[in-house]
Amino acid sequence: MPHQLGGVRLSPVNMRSKASNLQLLLFFRFFGAAILLFPLMYLMEKNLQKPTMKDYALFAVLGLTGIAFYNIFFFLASKHAPVIKSSLFIASNPVLIVLLSALFLKETITRNNLIGMAIALSGAFYVITDGNLMNLFQLGFEPIDFVLMGAVVSWALYSVVGKIVLKKFSSVESTTYAVAFGTLFLLPFAFAETSWQDVQHAPGTTWLAIIHMSVLVTVVSFVMYYNGIKEVGAAKASIFINVMPVSAVFMATLFLGETFTAGHAIGATLVLTGVYIGTNPKLFKRKPKLAKNKIA
C-alpha cells in the first residue's frame, strides 16, 4: 500500500479549513498523478499491451475500490472518527488481504507469514497507542466504524484484484489505468458541492500539497506497492502496511517536532521484526537431518 510514504497523506485533512471541499483535493491529487503516469508508462514500457474490454472492467474495479472508495471512506472517517481508531482499522488491513489472497488467489500462507503479521500488527497497535494498549478497550463501536470497514474492504479488494491484473500488465500499466478510472469516479464527488471559483481561489500551499501527494504518495508509492504484489504476492506485500504508523511517527518527529517516545521505539521494533519474519521464508525452517552412513 502506498503506506510507507503515506505518513504525510493526512495533509488534505489538515487543510480542510483552507479548502472548500475535501473531495476536490482528492480529485486533483489523482488527476495530477494520471497526467504524470501516462507519459511515464509510454516511456518505461516498451511492449505495451492493448487492454481488452475485460481488462478495462478490471481496471475500473481497481479505480473504484483502491482510488475512489478507499480515499472517500478514509477521509470521511477521519473527519468524524478519532485518529487512533482510523489508524487501527488501516493497520488491520493485512489480515483481510491475507484471508482473501488465500481464498481467491490460492496464495500459500506460511507459518512465517502469520507469525510476522501478528508481530507487526501488535507493533503497529503499540505505536498508534504510544504503548497504552488499554486505550483500545475504551474506543467502543460507533456507526462511523462501518465507513472505516468500507475503507479496509476497498483496499483489500484493490490488492487482491490487482494481483489478477498484474499477471498480464506491469505495475506501471496497472497503476496508470487504475488511477485514470479512479479519477473519473472521483469527479462527481469533487464538484458536487464546489464551483470552479473554489478551485481558482485555492491557496498556493494547497497546490504544493497536491503536487507532493500526486508525485510521492500516489505515483511513486502506488507503483512500488503493485510491484511488490507482482513480485511476492498480495499477502506478503500487505504486511508492509504496518510500517505506515512507524513512518508517520518518524516524519512527525523530524518535521513537526513531535516527541519520539519509548512506546514508539518498542512498537517500531516489533513492526520491523514482524516484517522481517513475515517476508523471510527461510527463517525458522528446520534443516533436514543428514542420514548416518551405515558401517559395513
Image: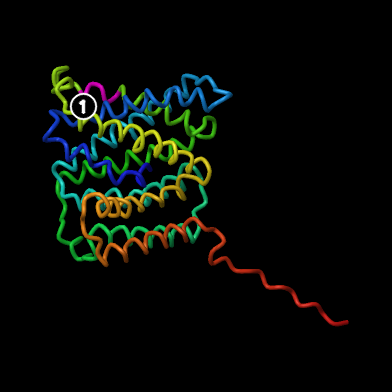
> How far across and how far down the image is residue 202, in percent?
16, 26
Would you identify the image quadrant in which residue 262 lies? Answer: bottom left
The residue under label 1 is 24
Q: In the image, is residue 189 part of the stretch drawn in magenta? A: yes
Would you identify the image quadrant in which residue 49 lies? Answer: top right
> How far across and how far down the image is residue 148, in percent?
23, 44
> Which part of the image, by quadrant, shows the C terminus?
bottom right
Q: Is residue 78 left or right of residue 69?
A: left
> What secondary structure prevails in the magenta region?
helix
The residue lying at 38 percent from left, 50 percent from top is 94
Q: Which residue is farthest right?
A: 296
Q: Give the residues in magenta.
A: 185-190
- Residue in the foreground of this view, choosing between 73 and 219: 219
- Residue in the foreground of this view, choosing between 238 and 58: 238
> How far across and how far down the image is residue 205, in percent?
20, 33
The residue lying at 27 percent from left, 41 percent from top is 9
Coloring applied to the structure: rainbow
- Residue in the foreground of this view, choosing between 84 and 13: 13
Q: Is residue 290 left or right of residue 209?
A: right
Q: How many marks?
A: 1
> How far across and how far down the image is residue 174, in percent?
46, 30
Amino acid type at image mark 1: Leu
In the depicted structure, whether residue 157 falls above or below residue 193: below
Q: Is residue 82 left or right of residue 292?
A: left
The residue lying at 38 percent from left, 29 percent from top is 61
- Residue in the foreground of this view, choosing between 227 and 94: 227
Q: Which residue is farthest top?
A: 196
Q: In the image, is residue 95 part of the stretch drawn in magenta? A: no
